[in-house]
Amino acid sequence: MSKISVIGSGRWGTFLAWYMANYCKMEQVQIYSRPEAPDFIELKETRKNPYLTLSDNITLHDKISEVLDNEYIIISIGCQHLRSLAKELNGYNVSGKTFILAMKGLEEPSATILSDVMYQEINQEIHIATLGGPGHVQDYMKKVPSCAVIDSDDDETKDRVVKLMQSELIRFYYGSDFIGNQIGAALKNVIGIAAGILDGLEWYGLKGALMARAPVEVGRFIKHFGGNPMTAYGLSHLGDYEATLFSKHSHNRMFGEMFAKGEDFGKLAEGYYTLKAVKNIADKEGINMPICQALYKGVYEGADIKETIRSMFDRDLKHEFEQF
């Protein structure tokens, strides 16, 4: 029987369960979430959320032990909760399982990539793949196609996951930089906050500059961790800018816009936590990241937001194409 598990019942995790059940021809998809999670309560009571209705081949579980028999397990939870989940998973026999990390972020304050969090806490032989790239549930439910990237530190795992998840709705590419694609995906959320602030200030003319400059400093960060700086120009980062820097569905962009207006967004914006991790490492290691460092001053230290935004672009233009 073709089955897959999804850990997490937020909008993205629930969509991936629905996607696997309806586009990838899984006979059964099992969703696990904490029983007290509001999203999960809504799904149990109504079999739907604001975006979709669960198909009959999706089952809901409030005990993690009930969804660990399957070979493939998609994880879609808040990034800062991954370590505690990994510790819990290590209490079960998950040897040989393939975990697909469908979140985009870094653990703060250490800026640890998510695959490393899993490997640090699970002392069994597991396989890990990551999913990155553009796409919003609202658009996918309208059958708007998109592309994404699957990466892994193991080529066989990467190939299996790409073939497992491929469909006419989402075309998956094979990644070639496991570290860089995770960092690029995480930092696009940070850049999404910056874009939202520009929207909130109605400084739209600076978005082009943001899009041109951000991949340069993200590339520096990727290189510092041993990845390829050019990955910042791929699907996991620059390729996700339309969905993150412009879309009304982007939580990170909306967080930034409402922050600039002095309003509370009230929903999870992973870029908020990733920004703190990036700032800590950039300062400690001397990585030149003017956009992220200036953004931190505005978001975390209460600096004047207009002056902060101006400082992001206070660069000598003759160095636009400086080396990574």
Image: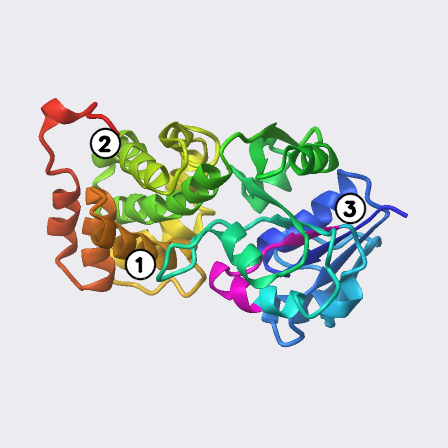
Q: Nearer the viewer, mark 1 or mark 2?
A: 1
- Residue type at mark 1? Lys
* Left or right side of 90 for 308: left
Relative to 176, residue 87 above or below: below
* Residue 36 picture location, percent across and down: 63, 76
In the picture of the structure, the residue carrying the numbered disc 3 is: 21
Q: Residue furthest right?
A: 1
Q: Earlier in the sequence, mark 1 or mark 2?
A: 2
Q: Is residue 185 left or right of residue 287?
A: right
Foreground of the two, 279 or 252: 279
Q: Residues within 10 Å of mark 2 (few under 14, many from 20)?
A: few
Label 1: few (<14), some or many (≥20) within 10 Å? many
**N-terminal of the two: label 1 or label 3?**
3
Count of labels shown? 3
What residue sits 59% from the left and 55% below the top? 76
- On the image, numbered disc 2 is attached to which residue? 209
Is 104 situated above or below 89?
above
76 magenta-colored: yes
Q: Which residues are magenta?
A: 72-84
Q: Quadrant of the C terminus?
A: top left
Residue underneath mark 1: 276
Residue 165 visible within the image: yes
